[in-house]
Image (tube, rainbow, N blue to C red):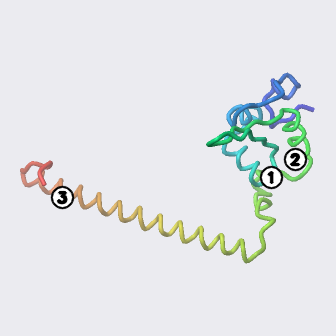
Amino acid sequence: MVSPILQPEYANGNSKEVLDSWKEIASFLNRGVRTVQRWEQQEGFPIHRHDHKKRATVFAVASEVQEWVKNRSNSETPTDPVNRDRSYSHLEARDLEARCIAARARALNARAHVRQVYEHYQAEINRVLARISAGGNALRS
């Protein structure tokens, strides 16, 4: 059976063995780079790194990736909306609650910031419109 997660040309075994970048790995899986990076962090996706002086480069072995996909498809799929909470199954209730509270606080702060920016620009727009209606130059301070 051809895996729906792999690109068709890769699913039939017509692939190179080493995938040399996040983009190449993501293309191999027919997914986005961020998705593959999340899978590495949360689901044990098989990534290897070449260490260099400043940064490491990533690569994956196609056969390992195919095996991981096969094993993953035999279990519940965390990207399935019904099972989305599975990625948090390792957290205890108090940890999950703390994350939710922190996320809510960040959302409220972002909302307050957006409101401040909106009010600032609305005041500027009103100032410019008042100058225009008074016959003045709208660009003067």
Point 71% across, 50% down: residue: 38
Mark 3 or 1 closer to N-term? 1
Q: What residue is pinned by disc 2?
A: 72
The picture places residue 117, in percent across and down from the top left corner, at 35, 60
Residue nearest the viewer, comparing 53 with 93: 53
Left or right, 66 with reference to 85:
right
Mark 2 surroundings: few (<14), some (14-19) or many (≥20) residues within 10 A: some
For label 3, the SS is helix
Q: Are marks 2 and 1 in contact (CB under 8 Å)?
A: yes
Q: What residue is pinned by disc 1?
A: 43
Q: Residue furthest left?
A: 135
- Say what amino acid the circle numbered 2 marks: Arg
Query: Which numbered circle lies on residue 127?
Result: 3
For label 1, the SS is helix
**What is the spatial separation of the Cα atoms under label 2 and label 3, in whole angstroms?**
59 Å
- Say what amino acid the circle numbered 3 marks: Arg
For label 2, the SS is helix
Q: Residue furthest front?
A: 53
Point 80% across, 37% down: residue: 5
